[in-house]
Image: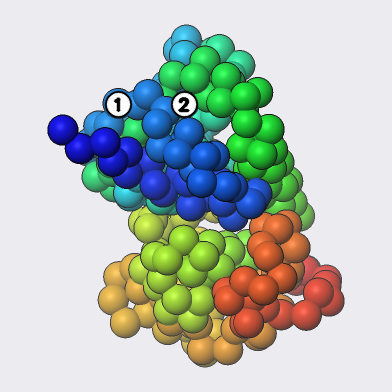
């Protein structure tokens, strides 16, 4: 039998390598983590709010969302995840899921026992630091999304979200900074931004009229003028904590804030 390690968790290695300089032994230890790969169909749940959780999950392909359902049944999407993301690290370490995680598309995932991750983090401090940094960046994105929903108007919220996806998809190797496929429907964008699907549709059309974006098909987005779209979205990429030499930042707007629209 081959002694070569499984490469199933390679997307996780690439993700954590972005935050810390991992050596060959660190990478090997991640690849050797016990895991169970599974294909989840579109809209399937990785975990539901209230469940007891003893494992984390790495997204190997596809897209997933974190969401909260309020008493009236309305949904707020609080994060969108893509290939390589550790989408359930918080729930698995806390023991009980305080929110649900659901896949948007058919997705390949790998479940990893939480205890194995904890042991790896303590045994290999560089990996532990990478896991810590990953959760800190998640928290940074959460803060920006709170500001986006709470203090920006619809036009600014949508423009901001489009800019964020442009950079994140570029870094993940899933699109270009100026052209990509949105992983969400307009209803799901509405749940990200606290708007109605009708309002989202009108705002996207307005951005097209302003020639800030072009949509050649249902979910395709082409950004005509990155700096103008970033200005319209009050977008500054600092909260994503991308590397200064990151290629996606070649289109970044200068870090000058502008007031949101009234």
Q: Could you tell which of marks 1 and 2 lies nearer the N-terminus?
A: 1
x and y, in percent, of residue 222 in the image = 43, 81
Query: Where 5 falls versus 62 (above or below)?
Result: above
Residue at 59%, 55% (x, y): give it.
Answer: 18
The answer to whether mark 1 and mark 2 are in CB contact below 8 A is no
Measured as percent of width and height from the top left, residue 83 is found at 41, 51
Secondary structure beneath dot 2 equals strand
Residue located at (75% from left, 63% from top):
238
| Residue named by callout 2 | 56
Q: Residue at x 44, y 19 (%)?
A: 113
Q: Secondary structure at mark 1?
A: strand
Is residue 138 at all visible to an observer of this figure? no
* Residue ID for mark 1: 36
Q: Position of residue 90 (x, y in %)?
A: 59, 27
**Label ID, residue 81:** none
Residue 173 picture quarter: bottom left
Q: Nearer the viewer, mark 1 or mark 2?
A: 1
Frontmost residue, 37 versus 164: 37
Task: Estimate the spatial distance between the alpha carbons at disc 1 and disc 2, rounded to whole Å.
Answer: 11 Å
The tally of labels here is 2
Residue 3 in the image: above or below residue 238: above
Name the side, left or right, on which 129 lies relative to 7: right
39 sits to left or right of 178: left
Residue drawn at (51%, 46%) of the image: 24
**Quadrant of the rendered structure where residue 231 is?**
bottom right
Q: Quadrant of the N terminus?
A: top left
Where does the C terminus fall, quadrant-wise? bottom right
């Amino acid at each position: 039998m081959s002694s070569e390690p499984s490469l199933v968790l390679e997307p996780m290695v690439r993700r954590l390598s972005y935050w810390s300089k991992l050596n060959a032994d660190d990478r090997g230890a991640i690849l050797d983590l016990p895991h169970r790969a599974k294909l989840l169909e579109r809209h399937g749940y990785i975990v539901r709010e209230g469940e007891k959780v003893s494992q984390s999950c790495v997204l190997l392909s596809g897209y997933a969302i974190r969401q909260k359902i309020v008493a009236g049944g309305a949904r707020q999407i609080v994060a969108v995840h893509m290939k390589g993301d550790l989408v359930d690290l918080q729930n698995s370490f806390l023991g009980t899921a305080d929110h649900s995680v659901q896949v948007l598309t058919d997705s390949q995932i790998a479940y990893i026992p939480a205890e194995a991750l904890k042991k790896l983090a303590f045994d290999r401090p560089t990996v532990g630091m990478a896991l810590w940094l990953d959760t800190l960046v998640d928290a940074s994105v959460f803060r920006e999304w709170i500001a986006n929903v709470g203090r920006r108007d619809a036009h600014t919220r949508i423009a901001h979200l489009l800019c964020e996806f442009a950079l994140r998809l570029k870094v993940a190797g899933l699109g270009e900074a100026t052209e990509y496929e949105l992983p969400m429907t307009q209803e799901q964008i509405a749940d990200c931004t606290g708007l109605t699907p009708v309002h989202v549709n009108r705002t996207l059309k307005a951005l097209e009229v302003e020639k800030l974006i072009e949509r050649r098909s249902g979910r395709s987005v082409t950004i005509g003028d990155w700096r103008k779209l970033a200005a319209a979205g009050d977008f500054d990429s600092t909260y994503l904590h991308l590397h200064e030499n990151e290629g996606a930042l070649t289109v970044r707007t200068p870090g000058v804030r502008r007031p949101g629209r009234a």
